[in-house]
Image (cartoon, grey):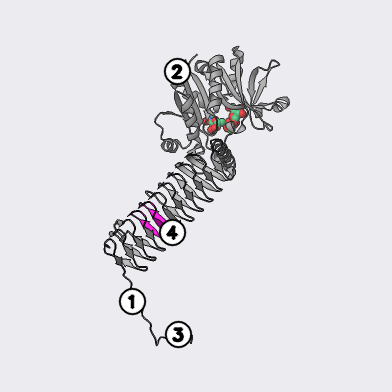
Amino acid sequence: MTNNIHGIILAAGKGTRMNSSKPKVLQTLSDKSLLGHVLYIAHQVCNKVHVVYGFGGEQVQNTINDDSVNWVEQKQQLGTGHAVAQAMPHIKDDSISLVLYGDVPLIKKSTLDDLINQAQQNEVALLSVVLDNPTGYGRIIRNSEDQIQAIVEQKDCDKEQLKIREVNTGIMAVNSNLLKKYLDGLDTNNAQGELYLTDIIEAAVGDKKTIASVITNNEYEVAGVNDKAQLAELERTFQQNQAAEFMQQGLGLKDPARFDCRGSLSFGQDCEIDVNVVIEGKVTLGNNTNIAPNCIIKNTQIGNNVSILPNSVIEDAVIGDGASIGPFARIRPEANIGENAKIGNFVEVKKSTIGKGSKVSHLSYIGDTTMGENVNIGAGVITCNYDGANKYQTTIEDGAFVGSDTQLIAPITIGKNATIGAGSTITKDVPADQLALSRSKQVIMSNWKRPIKK
Ligand code: UD1
Ligand code: CA
């Protein structure tokens, strides 16, 4: 018995049916490539992982960027047996080889643990699944004692064998020493003229080995991705499984079918997420926080009792306890929204701190700004932070009131409790407690007439 597990991930296929410039295994499901998913699981159960690549090798290696992987080239695709054989020179005899597929992304750790356990006891262990429609798959041939005798590919099956619904998933765990021996004995005497990995089963049976089997009940775990429709189907499965797990942990989801998390989400108690919310990267929610429909939230830390109102987009931000964001707010990177602050509709905040209890309720742009507590920003206020070449800082101190439709030309400081009259363009610092105005006096043109159409 060995605890030395070598993963061999077959990823040499071109994936023609994707109709994409990207190699198939780099197509993304949730936040990771297909191969990324397989590697994530493989690293959890293997001591060493080998990836057999073919098409787009450089692109695959650069994108995956995993130094712990041993990349093995398969120059010509001569069959699954040939693919596995390419990795064998890198594999120790006294180990178990676990064969996985770069385009079968949702295999579970618990299933692989079972399979490895079986291989530790029996030397050869195969993962199979029973399908309503087995067309296209290699059939599992069992004898009257229910013992596996062989795998016969669809194209090599006779009429009776075609009726068998238990099929080979391709995933197997085999004593590496035996695997080397059986791979050496493969030939291409089959309908496709390939070196079939599956033929090692018959060889092992001939060698008086018992073939252990694990049968999975989850078709999705062993489902491969060949085209965009299958990719979308597995994306849905992934999202539904994830949503079910979140709900079990206490997250309220109005409709788990209309929730997507492409990253990691953690949450306290009594949080609720309405429909069509997309979570990306690392997002955390405190207790009792609600997210309304159609929000996109990325890499953001959100506190307790927060309301994110509909159609808000938030990225790389921190939202304090009791804050209210949106509807239609855009919170950009390095925004830090203080406790009980309010960011209303059509407000954009970038690289700014908004103090406790401050309000920016309507139609504003706040960028490169440090705002104190209990500030009130009127509708349509713009911090003019950019002169076409450089960015400048705006400081608005506690209790300031900035009238509607004001432009604050940075660099500038608005003092504590200062007031700015509506419609002002403020270019100089405003001292604490003072009123600043910059608009011109209103005039009435008494002899002006509206033009008349000629
Ligand atoms: C294979 C199995 C079949 C099983 C099915 C499950 C064999 C002979 N047949 O059939 O019993 O039911 O998978 O999906 O193993 N690959 C390489 N290099 C090669 C050939 C294939 O890397 O030279 C990779 C492909 O990229 C693919 C995987 O191996 O990811 C399976 O190859 P494919 O030719 O699709 O095998 P199937 O005909 O589906
Ligand atoms: Ca296949």
Which mark is on residue 111?
none
Residue of label 1? 441
Q: CA distance from mark 2 to mark 4?
A: 66 Å
Q: Earlier in the sequence, mark 3 or mark 2?
A: 2
Between marks 2 and 4 in the image, the one whose residue lies nearer the viewer = 4
Q: Residues within 10 Å of mark 4 (few under 14, many from 20)?
A: many
Amino acid on which the number 4 mark rests in the picture = Ser
Q: CA distance from mark 3 to mark 2?
A: 93 Å
Q: Residue at x 47, y 43 (%)?
A: 280
Q: Position of residue 231 (x, y in %)?
A: 56, 40
> In the figure, residue 121 lies in which quadrant?
top right
> In the figure, residue 242 lies in which quadrant?
top right
Q: Earlier in the sequence, mark 1 or mark 3?
A: 1
Amino acid on which the number 1 mark rests in the picture = Lys
Between marks 1 and 3 in the image, the one whose residue lies nearer the viewer = 1
Residue of label 4? 361
Q: CA distance from mark 4 to mark 1?
A: 28 Å
